Image (cartoon, helix red, strand yellow):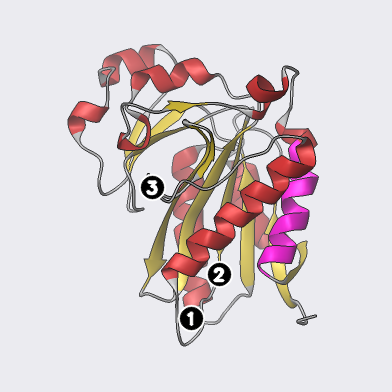
Amino acid sequence: MTDRLPGWLLAPAGLIDYDVANEAMHALARRRLAGEIPDTVIVVQHPPVFTAGRRATEDELLWDEGTVRARGGAVRRIDRGGSFTFHGPGQLVVYPILGLGGRPDAAAHLRRLEEVAIRTCADIGVTVGRRADVQTGVWVGDDKICAIGVRLLQARVTLHGMALNCDTDLAWFEGIVACGLPDHGVTSLTRELGRDVSVGEVVPTAIHHLSEVFELMLAEAPEDVVGPFVGAAVA
């Protein structure tokens, strides 16, 4: 078995403000690029927010921004790949900040993220799979259960990651054309199993598979690294 490399884990409690988390994630990626920190995995939940990747078009936002704000959400245009997606309570969001070495392979990184989601869902009791005929992500039939979108910093360090619907309020997805796919739906572990599946139930399983798939020995990140995320907790 390949020896696992040491890495940091950040798993702050509560809902973490998206803007603060996004800024802190980018700062960590710059530090990883400079070799100042090891590979780092961030595991969070956010308050309701629609994020638009580089391929998103304005007509894929079905609610105007005033309606989104009135419902307690926000809209952010960001630097990952992909189209619109939603983050919110009940959704497990994972941001791996990883150095890809001298021969970076973005496609392999995406497949590893899918593998983490597939193994995690299987352990919870839901059979999911890839849909190479559609796009990156993890699916139950025609319904996406885990969205994936990334960016590479200078083609060497990963940013952004995956969002797995646990007991997410799926009504929020009515406000967007999720992932730019009008003919496909979304689902959650809760919907598929017919019982409440909280993020708290899923986190230990997801961290286990993140460690396995990315061959990391994860330890709690230092307090100064965790601090910005803890300070961004809004609930």
CA distance for labels 1 and 2: 12 Å
- Provide the residue designation for mark 3: 133
**Image position of 180 (left or right of 149):** left
Secondary structure state at the residue bearing disc 2: loop
Residue 208 included in the magenta stretch of the image: yes
Tell me which amino acid carries mark 3.
Answer: Asp
Given contact means CB atoms under 8 Å apart, are the residues at marks 3 and 1 in contact? no
30 w.r.t. 49: above or below? below
- Provide the residue designation for mark 1: 34
On the image, the x and y values in percent for residue 127 come to 67, 38
Query: Upstream in the sequence, badge 1 or badge 2?
Result: 1
Secondary structure state at the residue bearing disc 3: loop
Span of residues in magenta? 202-214
On the image, the x and y values in percent for residue 54 come to 26, 49
Which quadrant does the C terminus fall into?
top right
Q: Which numbered mark, 3 or 1, is in the foreground of this view?
A: 3
Secondary structure state at the residue bearing disc 1: loop
Query: Upstream in the sequence, badge 3 or badge 1?
Result: 1
Mark 3 nearby-residue class (10 Å; few <14, some 14–19, many ≥20): few
- Provide the residue designation for mark 2: 98
Residue 88 included in the magenta stretch of the image: no
Tell me which amino acid carries mark 1.
Answer: Ala
Q: Residue at x 20, y 36 (%)?
A: 57
Q: Which numbered mark, 1 or 2, is in the foreground of this view?
A: 2
Task: Evaluate whether residue 47 shows in this view.
Answer: yes
Mark 1 nearby-residue class (10 Å; few <14, some 14–19, many ≥20): few
